[in-house]
Amino acid sequence: MLTHPLRRVIATCASALLVLGLVAATSSPSQAEDPYVQSVGGMVVDAEGVGVAGISVTVYRATGNTDSPWVLDSTLLTRGDGGWTAARLPAATYRIMFNEFDDGTAAWTTWRPTPWSQTDDDEQITEFTVGPEVWVDYTRTVLHPRGGEVRGTISASYGRTLYGADIVLYDAEGNGDKPLSTTTKSGDGGRYSIRLSTRPTKIFIRTSHLGSRLVSRWVGGSTFEDAKTFTMSDGEVSEGNDEVITYLEPSTISGRVLDPEGRPVVSAEIVGYKSKDGVGGPWEYMGSVAYTRSPTAAEPELAGTFMAKLDPGRYRFKIEPFYEYGHLLRDEFYGDAATIDAAASIDHARTDQTLPDIVLAHSGGSVSGRVVDSAGKPLANVRVSSGLTRFGPSWPMAKTVTDAAGAYTIRVSSDPTTLRFVTSSAAHFEDFSLSELTVPVGETLLQADVQMIPKPIANTSTPKIYGSLSVGRSLKTAGGAWAPAAVTKNYRWYYLKGGRIRPIIGGTRSYLTLRKTDYGKRFRVRVTASHPGLNSKVVISRWSTALLRNSSMSLSVSSPSRGKIKLTAKVSASGAKATGKVRFSCGTSSAIFAAKTVTLRSEKASATLSTSYSTRMTCRANYHGNSTTKKTSRSKGVTVK
């Protein structure tokens, strides 16, 4: 039964309990007939009044038996806010404890280490009776800290601190197989802080969730037995409990892949599968774990070798060869198997291991023949490739070239295959294909001869004219680029003057020497390419610019009176009399104030310009030139009166 003072305490806290949602259920006439008539609830808080989650609330029922006066009725944990509820208890007398249990007598002992304990300083209900018209409300059960605090830093062996490592407590008097309820995680900088009870405790650093290569360990030891035991007194703080987590570097599985003739196979993809249970299937696809390597000048023995870095486990490999020069090999699983279920397993530990040589089988047969031109002459160095017909020419699977006699032998798939024959650009033959070849595994198709058809002559770059447009100098051309390259080129030069095109007498070389009679003319060249057995082809270059005489000019400028500018220009042309017009203009950098165009008379032109500005100006004379003479110009400054 509740004492009178304690009833007053509960009544005083009733309004606060409504806010916290911890109001106890009350009985009603219908509940009086129900043996389960009451619910009991409350709040567990720390000394600052903050709810404490995870506290064990243990409810015991009185038996009336003096030998065993109490029996366990129910156990629950406080919620995240510290609240708890024992629902619908049958009518009886109860005792409720926090983080404690009954060993069958009246002696109460600690149930599990915890940073909180109920003290005798707080007024608490120890026993209560549930029945009709009786209600019980545990208001705020205050638990005070007990034990001490352990602090430290967690880092990995590669030098970085570990965030999020689990800090797990174990009873030091146990065997290390069952963790206690209190845990935490390392925070920024790998730092951790956890409160321990006064009973002996050991700390385990669990890192498996951070990566399989991080090895979990105990604080102060490698096993539970040699780990450090913490026996903390109230308020004690233990600093510097740092631990370095070992990071295990993966070990390697190495091997070499060969073809049936014992030649290394390079660029083959090694696809990995890992057993999920470490024994058999299911096999988890890992993707590429390695590729076979190509040899180097310094290490030719690398050809066909591979090395995969893997964690311990059971694996199976699939070898998928890329086409190699003159080879066509089939995909297969390690152990000469066609499926993963039939493949051989590789048990891999923390030590490097080397597999026996893996020899791949050919995936089909071979084709042999000769390649000749239209005259029956053997063609050497013709590129021959084989690929599955359904994939087209862009996916060759084997390659070779013809020898000096035009002969070739190439591997092909047992599926419908297409052979493609391609010559160099210098040979200039049409590409040729043999389609839908089917050769069984191990067989050879003989006399697969091919006659290559020449391509027509093609111009790949138009002829260009270069050189100096000066009398006595030459214009030249390389004749452009052609396929085949070994064509014979013939030249014919032409000129354009007065809208008429005429061939130049004697202009049949790759160059043209310019003469005085060529002033005012533009030039171009026609190139005719020919090759035995092929039709000739003609290409014409673009017109050059015209050959023009050089010209020169002198200019005199004066301001004889206010607002007047007098200009005189004399023009001369090399080898001829200068004719045409001269444009005079005067102004500043921002505007022209006066201008006039005058026709040359006896290679001389004069003009007087008027302006309303009295300032410093620049005057220019521009000779327009003519059909045989180049343009020229001259400028001078003058101060206008």
Image (cartoon, grey):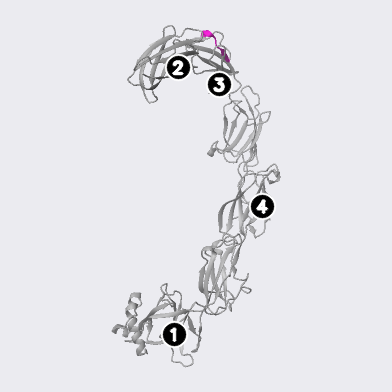
Q: Nearer the viewer, mark 3 or mark 2?
A: 2
* The residue stretch that appears in magenta: 510-517
Circle 2 residue:
633
- Which amino acid type is marked by label 4? Ser
Depth check, mark 1 against mark 2: the one in front is 2
Foreground of the two, 40 or 391 = 40
Distance CA(mark 4)–CA(mark 1): 70 Å
Q: Amino acid at mark 2?
A: Ser
Pointer 3 residue: 480
Of the residues under marks 1 and 2, which one precedes in the sequence?
1
Q: Amino acid at mark 3?
A: Gly
Rendered view: 5 above or below 567: below
Q: Callout 1, which amino acid? A: Asp
Q: How many marks?
A: 4
Q: Position of residue 337 (x, y in %)?
A: 62, 51
Q: Is residue 117 magenta?
A: no
Q: Are marks 3 and 4 in contact (CB under 8 Å)?
A: no
Separation of residues labelled 3 and 4 (CA atoms)? 55 Å
Question: Disc 3 or disc 4, which is closer to the eye?
Answer: 3
Contact, CB < 8 Å: mark 4 with mark 1? Answer: no
Badge 3 or badge 1: first in the primary sequence: 1
Q: Quadrant of the C terminus?
A: top left
| Image x and y of residue 347, in percent | 64, 59
Query: Where is residue 514, by image quadrant?
Result: top right
Q: Between marks 1 and 2, how big is the CA–CA gap?
A: 114 Å
Sequence-first disc among 3 and 4: 4
What is the C-alpha distance between the residues marked 3 and 2? 38 Å
Residue topped by disc 1: 121
Q: SS for tag 4?
A: strand
